[in-house]
Image (cartoon, grey):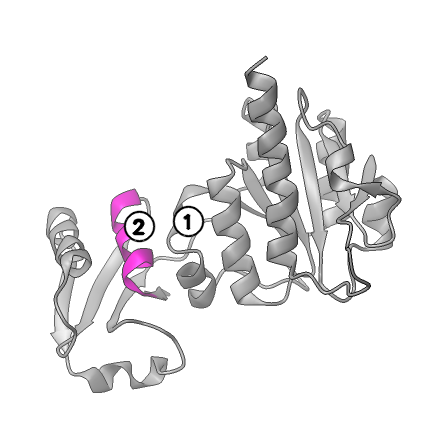
């Protein structure tokens, strides 16, 4: 069964990447033509994808979404197997592990951040975590097509596999003693575990972690959005890599 994605950026990226079959693109008749829409139509023609102009009433079931008057029927994403991921050559690479993220907008924003920061993959559990859906695709602005999403049955087993393959594990916890910028992220493969905003990273994963870090707060108000928290940490790793490469 096809998934539905909506919004000009997400559909454009899906057409450019080209690794997922797009069955049909529906465009509202009252949508104003612009360069992005013209690009979508041209890319659709090149790939042989049917696009149709339909009455705006066709979009009534998607009224809660910012669909921009365009949706596409697309094949579901293919999750990568962790063993296949680990078989690839990795050098000073990073992965992000999500433990109990429930909000689709957060997952989409995290995917977008990870692609911008050159993260090699994102690991999510098959249960108790939001899966990739149309909101995730839209929020990621097409970034979902540029990074492997690895779905596993057990995060504990996944972390153990990473450690057995010489990956270091960094978990986040508000009560940690060390700050996230105290870790030297250079010259190693590492995973960063982010937990749900209320529950945090599970105790079983904290026990397996090599480093446990926090983001210091200047006010006693620990309510940083998980996608924003990841951005702070992951771009610290980027900063360190860039600084190290200039030596």
Quarter of the image that includes the N terminus: bottom left
Alpha carbon distance from label 2 to label 1: 8 Å
Residue, x 21% and y 65% (percent of image)? 25
Residue 97 x/y as whole percent: 66, 47
- Please report the bounds of the magenta region as a residue range: 6-18
* Front-most of residues 184 and 156: 184
Q: Is residue 45 above or below residue 168?
A: below
Which numbered marker is on residue 143?
Answer: 1
Q: Is residue 129 above or below residue 79?
A: below
Report which residue position mark 2 lands on.
Answer: 13
Local SS, label 2: helix
First in residue order: circle 2 vs circle 1: 2
Mark 2 and mark 1 residues within 8 Å of each other at the beta carbon:
yes
Predominant SS of the magenta segment = helix
Q: Is residue 247 above or below residue 139?
A: above
Residue 195 x/y as whole percent: 72, 56
* Front-most of residues 132 and 32: 32
Residue, x 18% and y 71% (percent of image)? 27
Q: Is residue 245 left or right of residue 171?
A: left
In the rendered image, the residue lying farthest to the top is 247
Whether residue 42 appears in this view of the structure is: yes
Q: Is residue 76 left or right of residue 125?
A: left
Quarter of the image that includes the C terminus: top right
Residue 103 x/y as whole percent: 59, 67
On the image, which quarter does residue 56 sit in?
A: bottom left
Q: Is residue 31 highlighted in magenta?
A: no
């Amino acid at each position: 069964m096809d998934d539905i994605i909506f919004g000009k950026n997400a559909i454009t990226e899906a057409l450019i990447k080209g690794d997922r079959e797009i069955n049909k693109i529906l465009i509202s008749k009252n949508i104003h033509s612009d360069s992005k829409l013209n690009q979508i139509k041209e890319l659709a023609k090149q790939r042989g994808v049917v696009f149709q102009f339909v009455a705006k009433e066709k979009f009534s079931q998607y009224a809660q979404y910012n669909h921009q008057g365009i949706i596409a029927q697309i094949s579901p994403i293919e999750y990568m197997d962790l063993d296949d991921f680990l078989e690839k050559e990795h050098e000073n690479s990073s992965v992000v592990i999500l433990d109990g993220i429930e909000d689709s907008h957060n997952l989409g924003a995290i995917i977008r951040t990870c692609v911008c920061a050159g993260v090699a993959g994102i690991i999510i559990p098959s249960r108790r975590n939001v899966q990739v859906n149309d909101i995730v695709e839209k929020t990621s602005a097409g970034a979902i097509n540029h990074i492997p999403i690895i779905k596993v049955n057990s995060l504990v087993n996944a972390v153990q596999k990473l450690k057995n393959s010489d990956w270091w594990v960094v978990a986040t916890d508000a009560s940690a003693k060390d700050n996230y910028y105290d870790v030297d992220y250079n010259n190693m493969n590492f995973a960063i575990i982010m937990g749900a905003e209320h529950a945090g990273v599970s105790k079983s994963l904290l026990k397996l972690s090599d480093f446990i870090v926090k983001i210091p707060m200047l006010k006693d108000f620990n309510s940083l959005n998980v996608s924003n928290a990841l951005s702070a940490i992951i771009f610290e790793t980027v900063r360190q890599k860039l600084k190290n490469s200039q030596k």
